[in-house]
Image (cartoon, helix red, strand yellow):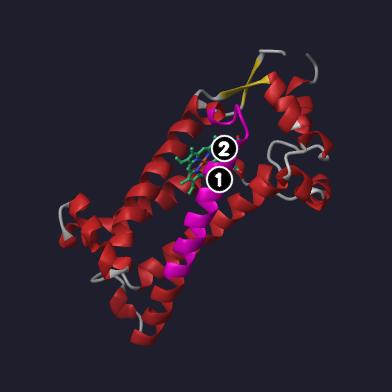
């Protein structure tokens, strides 16, 4: 097995990613504190109810801003191609563990791309709706009816983001050798060949 390493992420991209992950956990825990009274105890992690309420929108905003930077770098790599549509047709095989029978994927496979767009859309909805009921700054510009709808959509988007992130982390751990892409920035050549053969061809051509 070849142990030659290929660069998958730059240092800045990795720092950006882990900052997003940290903000996701902090914004998520402070948000859950307001989701249901039985979860209010989580507010103690942030210094009590008032502090959790003050910090939550800022933590969310930092997550969105950091994601925007990653989005600007990666959105092109996440556009769905003809090869992805072929991959999608055989996705059941992948779930059964038959990786060898899968059509070749590029830098990201179809499932990763769907998770990327689910993250992007849910973060956009969280941002827009969150601003709509952010007291005292922006809430006065919206009617109570609009704010109610915004609160509902905010919760739905949060559930989508959490579900997408659970799938994302599960896949990162399930496909051996993936976590190092974000922890060290490199992957082994055999990982690239097995999981993202079109990307492997692209980054090794001319060698
Ligand atoms: C502990 C939590 C997390 C772990 C272990 C993790 C792990 C990883 C790994 C290993 C990759 C590289 C995958 C590859 O190159 O094939 C990656 C990429 C990525 N991660 Fe995470 N991640 C976590 C949390 C998050 C969160 C909370 C977000 C956003 C809300 C996020 C957004 C992304 C994005 C956008 C990419 C690039 C993939 C793409 O563009 O399709 N991650 N992550």
181 or 204: which is nearer to us?
181
Q: Which residue is mark 1?
A: 168
In the image, what residue occupies the spot 74% across and 43% down? 94
| Residue 148 percent across, percent down from the top left | 38, 81
Q: Residues within 10 Å of mark 2 (few under 14, many from 20)?
A: some
Q: Are marks 1 and 2 in contact (CB under 8 Å)?
A: yes
Occupied quadrant, residue 51: bottom left
7 or 102: which is nearer to us?
102
The C terminus - image quarter? top right
Give the secondary structure at mark 2. Answer: helix
Q: Is residue 46 left or right of residue 201?
A: left
Give the secondary structure at mark 1. Answer: helix
* Image position of 145 with respect to 72: above or below: below
Q: Is residue 7 left or right of residue 32?
A: right
Magenta stretch, overall SS: helix
- In the image, residue 171 lies in the stretch drawn in magenta: yes
């Amino acid at each position: 097995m070849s142990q030659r390493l290929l660069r998958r992420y730059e240092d800045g991209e990795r720092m950006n990613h882990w900052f997003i992950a940290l903000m996701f956990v902090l914004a998520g825990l402070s948000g859950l504190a307001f989701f249901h009274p039985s979860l209010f105890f989580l507010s103690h992690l942030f210094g009590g109810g008032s502090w959790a309420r003050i910090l939550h929108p800022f933590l969310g905003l930092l997550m969105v801003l950091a994601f925007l930077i990653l989005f600007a770098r990666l959105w092109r790599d996440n556009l769905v191609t003809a090869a992805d549509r072929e991959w999608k047709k055989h996705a059941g095989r992948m779930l059964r563990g038959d990786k060898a029978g899968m059509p070749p994927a590029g830098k990201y496979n179809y499932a990763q791309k769907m998770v990327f767009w689910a993250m992007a859309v849910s973060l956009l909805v969280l941002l827009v709706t969150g601003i709509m009921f952010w007291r005292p700054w922006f809430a006065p510009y919206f009617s109570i009816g609009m704010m109610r709808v915004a609160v509902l959509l905010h919760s739905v988007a949060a559930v989508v983001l959490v579900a997408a992130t659970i799938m994302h982390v599960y896949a990162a751990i399930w496909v051996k050798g993936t976590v190092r892409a974000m922890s060290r920035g490199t992957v082994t050549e055999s990982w690239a060949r097995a999981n993202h053969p079109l990307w492997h061809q692209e980054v090794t051509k001319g060698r």
